[in-house]
Image: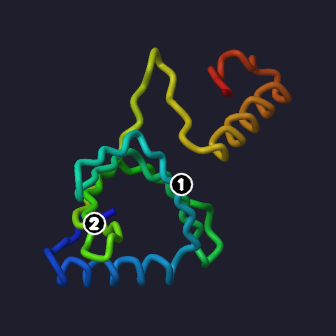
Amino acid sequence: MSLGELTGFGELGLDFMRERLRALFEQYRVKMVPIVIDVVVNGATAYDFGWHGITLTPKAGEPPLYQRVRYLERWKKNAAGEWKISFFVSNEDLKETFHGMQPRWFISENQVATDEVSERVRGGGCASQARIRHS
C-alpha cells in the first residue's frame, strides 16, 4: 500500500514501488492473501477489485501486524497476448462495527479472541460478554 507515499507514473512509479517493496521485505516476512470480489473483462482490458489481507511478521521478532487494503487493478493485454497490470490503486480498509461487534479479518484474530474468552472463563468472567463470533 502506498498510503502517504509518492506513487509516481510510468517507470518512475515502478521504481517507487520496487523501493517500497525492497524496504518492506528487508524488515518483514510478508504473507498476502488476495480476496477478489470481481473480474471484469472488456476486450484487451480487464479490471479486478477486492481486498488484500496482509500479515507482516517483523524479522526482529516483534508480534505480527495485520492489514487489509482495498484494491483496484486495471490489466491490459499486450501484443504477445500477456496480461499486465497497467494501473493499481489501494487504500486502507477500515473495520466497521456492526451492532457493537468488531469483525475479525484474520484467523489469528479468532485465536486471540478465543484466548481472551478462555482467560475470562478461568478468571470467573462470563464468556458471553466477550461477544465472539466464529464462522
Q: Is residue 129 left or right of residue 50?
A: right
To which quarter of the image does residue 10 belong?
A: bottom left
Discs 2, 1 touching: Cβ within 8 Å: no
Across and down, in percent, residue 32 comes to 52, 60
The kind of secondary structure element at disc 2 is strand
User: Which callout, 2 or 1, points at the residue further toward the start of the chain?
Assistant: 1
* Quadrant (top left, top right, bottom left, bottom right) of the C terminus: top right
The kind of secondary structure element at disc 1 is strand
Q: Amino acid at mark 1?
A: Val
Q: Is residue 101 left or right of residue 18?
A: right
Between the C-alphas of marks 2 and 1, the distance is: 24 Å
- Colour scheme used in the picture? rainbow
Q: Amino acid at mark 2?
A: Lys
Q: Where 103 falls versus 62 (above or below)? A: above
Q: Where 6 falls versus 48 (above or below)? A: below
The residue furthest right is: 122
Q: Is residue 110 left or right of residue 34?
A: right
Across and down, in percent, residue 27 comes to 51, 79
**What residue do we see at 23% from left, 59% from top?**
44
Q: Which residue is mark 1?
A: 33
Across and down, in percent, residue 127 comes to 74, 20
**What residue do we see at 25% from left, 64% from top?**
76
Q: Is residue 4 left or right of residue 84?
A: left
Q: Viewer-proximal residue, 72 or 97? A: 72
Across and down, in percent, residue 123 comes to 82, 28
How crowded pointer 1 is (Cα within 10 Å; few <14, some 14-19, many 20+) is rated as few
Q: Where 9 falls versus 95 (above or below)? A: below
Q: Viewer-proximal residue, 101 or 51? A: 51
| Of marks 2 and 1, the one in the foreground | 2
Numbered mark located on residue 77 in the image = 2
